[in-house]
């Protein structure tokens, strides 16, 4: 029995309940977020001990607030980002502090009257130059925060030196508190449930590849399915088609991948990632995957118009087309697995690609045989387009395969089994459409596996 | 006459010369960058006057360094970003300062022994909660910096209150210096050669649209051109083909567009942009343009394999295909112009789209007529794919047209001339391939232009 009062109360509660649900969802999605919040709180509580404990307070004085300030701005979600900011802050403070003191002494040479003018000019020029340097792409990418702190510290030291008498002590105090704050951040961020940017990048690349694979595996069955409108009208029994839309997040993953790779560069070796893990190669694979995703986006447009009209022609290519799509998907899934398990791309990925190529040949010969023109061209256009785009996707999968081979080489992935020298499809697959042109040919020669150098590595971890 | 010494000297100079060239290029690309550097330097020099001028120094004390700190971290490239950070910082400082004082008084109730423990717990809990809130998408998007400053100020006030006697005065000093710093930033950033995020977004959308248009305008001529290998082998006389690659930057413009729109939200009205300019609609247009760019990316793959093989078939569709592509390009160029000049999409854009549709009809009837099958299907596949993708692109251009119409409505663009009621192609264009399916039909009904409500607005500015 709901009274009106209770109803009003419930209504007022609705946004709060909503918020709580949202927060719960955020925490469930990635429990490391909750852990991160506690880590930040721990770091701040630890450095604020400087204030609470009398002996420490006497040593540091008011400069203790700089330790808190450092923790707040330096502590980032991933260990790499924290290291990047911490190192940038420490080095920039040191450099700018020294320069600031130099500027201070230099300005004093001009006598008490001109001192402030000279200092002002120096600050103006250096700040302008440093601000401009932040537009240089290389500096922006890796040292942006350092330059910011350089500007800050230089201005502070040069300017406050004008009033503060014992500037050396001030500089010493500030530097030591900043080092205290930075070190606290870095230690907590690395030692307490660390979130590694490198690992996240690794997982992101794997999951993106799996998303592409899911689409391709499902696509063939989807597009050649006859629309059964009675069933879909019901709506309740519709199967889950989310796998068909998951690839969309791959289209816009560039910024995420680049920032993770950038932070991964700062991280020490951890787990299966050594210090010099080839993060750049991950970015290269990311670019190729996006290329593949663009083609998939084009393909996705054809899912709406299923191929009813030209059912005769459809039947003749349905088999090999479905194979092309699903085998490309399987190959990608195998490749994702190989990255996930830190092992060389398996033979089955090669076999999948070979099967793809056989299917391409099959489609080609079907099409070759159909020059007599039994079909209205207008009606077979969507199918032909789909075949053509699938062909492009297979080419993409092949380049992804090669890129992952390079990655395995660079990152010393384990080789799973002794392999025989293999020349995979040493010939050339007749490309769709253009026979004279070289660039259309698909040639895969596996040249990297030389039998005498194969070692069987004991499986790690 | 170069001596070895001179050569060595020149060699050592090379990286410096390189750097200077790079810096010059950065400055030339966007002279506002140089201006920005000087603006930041000016702001810092101005607030450091606090230290140089004795009467001001006495009023502010050491808190003056907070003004410098505020300027360094708040001053951003665009006015919107500066406003966003400045407002966030100001409000967060106020709120966190008040809460910090409250926490301080609350902790004192527990007596001098327990005070530090209670304070520590309060700081720990609030910091953890605030850090977690930064993961909530809405807060992350607009108030991320504010939460950071909230954490900072709350910790500083709560913790330093434990030692500092006259905490109210400290809080007052700090708040006033932060307001001084923030106000300096905002005033300089808005009044001295302002860089508006909104204007940049406007320009970005226009230039991206022009890039897509350039590709489409050039594509037809490019792909139906016979490869003249003797000429290209020379290399020196190769015409500039950069317009064919320019569209690639559109593929990854999402992050840029979103951050600009986010900052534009903070900006006051300026020039032709009112305070409530529909920035969200720009994002919508951006999404549609990227959709178009994905199709163009697919199309671009076919530029390598020019259509020699099936020259008979080629000739029969060359005309309408080139028209489809170039008219779609012209329509986009017209639309870009209409955004650029703040006016309703012109009639000529409509006419271009109509011409596109006529070309689609023409291609369709050519294909319809070719059911007899004079051609080997395998050879005409690339052309058919290109036609199919071009058709998708035309659909995209139509949705872009509609989105820009909405924008014109929302942003009160000027109507260029009295228009007659027009139903543009009220019928339906036979889609390529699928006759039975509704979603394939292309129907444009211009429903927004009602003759009696048309006003002729005097051209502004």
Image: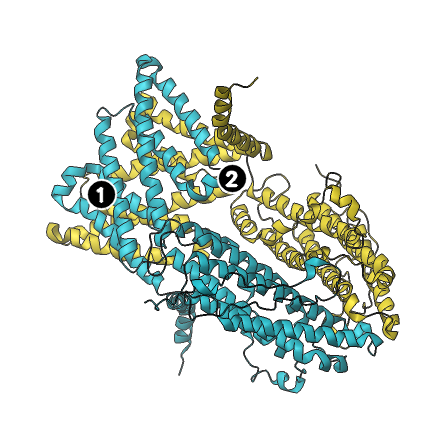
Chain colours: A yellow, B cyan
Marks 2 and 1, Cα distance to the nearest angstrom?
34 Å
Q: Position of residue A335 (x, y in %)?
A: 73, 50
Residue A114 visible to the viewer? yes
Query: Which numbered disc flags the more N-terminal residue, 2 or 1?
Result: 2
Q: Is residue B402 above or below residue A412?
A: below
Q: Is residue A33 above or below residue A397?
A: above
- How many badges with numbers are in the image? 2
Q: Which residue is mark 1?
A: A160
Q: What residue is shown at x 48% (from left), y 63% (from top)?
A: B450
| Helix, strand or loop at mark 2 | helix
The answer to whether B170 appears left or right of B144 in the picture is left
| Helix, strand or loop at mark 1 | helix
**Badge 1, how many Cα within 10 Å: few under 14, some, many 20+?**
many
Q: Nearer the viewer, residue A170 or A310?
A: A310
- Label 1 chain ID: A
Q: Is residue B119 above or below residue A160?
A: above
Dividing the picture into quadrants, the one containing residue B410 is bottom left
Q: Are marks 2 and 1 on the same chain?
A: yes
Q: Quadrant of the N terminus of chain A?
A: top right
Q: Position of residue A311 (x, y in %)?
A: 85, 60
- Label 2 chain ID: A
The answer to whether B321 appears left or right of A178 in the picture is right
**Badge 2, how many Cα within 10 Å: few under 14, some, many 20+?**
many
Dividing the picture into quadrants, the one containing residue B315 is bottom right
The answer to whether A452 appears left or right of B440 in the picture is right
Q: Position of residue A308 (x, y in %)?
A: 80, 58
Residue A79 circle label = 2
Q: Nearer the viewer, residue B458 or A80?
A: B458
């Amino acid at each position: 029995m709901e009274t009106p009062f209770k109803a009003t109360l419930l209504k007022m509660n609705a946004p709060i309940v909503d918020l709580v649900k949202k927060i719960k969802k955020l925490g469930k999605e990635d429990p490391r977020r909750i852990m991160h919040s506690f880590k930040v709180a721990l770091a701040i509580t630890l450095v604020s001990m400087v204030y609470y404990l009398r002996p420490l307070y006497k040593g540091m004085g008011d400069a203790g607030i700089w330790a808190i300030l450092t923790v707040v701005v330096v502590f980032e979600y991933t260990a790499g980002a924290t290291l990047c900011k911490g190192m940038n802050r420490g080095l920039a403070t040191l450099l700018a502090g020294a320069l600031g003191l130099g500027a201070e002494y230099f300005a004093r040479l001009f006598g008490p009257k001109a001192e402030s003018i000279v200092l002002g000019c120096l600050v103006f020029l250096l700040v302008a130059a440093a601000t401009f340097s932040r537009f240089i792409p290389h500096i922006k990418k890796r040292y942006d925060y350092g330059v910011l702190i350089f500007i800050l510290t230089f201005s502070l030291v040069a300017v406050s030196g004008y009033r503060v008498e014992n500037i050396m002590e001030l500089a010493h105090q500030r530097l030591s508190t900043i080092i205290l704050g930075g070190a606290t951040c870095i230690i907590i961020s690395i030692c307490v449930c660390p979130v590694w940017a490198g690992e996240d990048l690794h997982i992101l690349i794997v999951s993106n590849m799996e998303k592409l694979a899911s689409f391709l595996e499902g696509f063939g069955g989807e597009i050649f399915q006859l629309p059964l409108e009675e069933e879909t009208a019901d709506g309740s029994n519709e199967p889950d088609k989310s796998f068909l839309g998951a690839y969309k997040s791959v289209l816009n993953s560039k910024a995420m991948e680049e920032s993770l790779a950038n932070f991964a560069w700062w991280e020490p070796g951890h787990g299966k990632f050594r210090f010099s893990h080839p993060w750049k190669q991950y970015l290269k694979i990311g670019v190729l995957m996006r290329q593949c995703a663009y083609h998939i986006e084009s393909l996705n447009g054809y899912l709406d118009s299923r191929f009813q009209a030209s059912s005769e022609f459809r039947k003749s290519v349905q088999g090999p087309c479905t194979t092309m799509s699903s085998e490309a998907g399987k190959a990608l899934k195998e490749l994702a697995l190989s990255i996930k398990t830190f092992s060389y791309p398996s033979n089955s990925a090669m076999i999948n690609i070979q099967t793809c190529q056989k299917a391409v040949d099959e489609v080609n010969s079907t099409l070759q045989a159909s020059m007599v023109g039994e079909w209205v061209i207008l009606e077979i256009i969507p199918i032909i387009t789909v075949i053509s785009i699938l062909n492009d996707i297979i080419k993409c999968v092949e380049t992804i395969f090669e890129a992952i081979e390079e990655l395995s080489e660079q990152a010393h992935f384990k080789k799973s089994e002794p392999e025989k020298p293999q020349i995979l499809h040493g010939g050339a697959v007749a490309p769709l459409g253009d026979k004279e042109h070289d660039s259309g040919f698909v040639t895969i020669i596996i040249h990297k596996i030389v039998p005498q150098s194969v070692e069987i590595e004991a499986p790690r971890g």
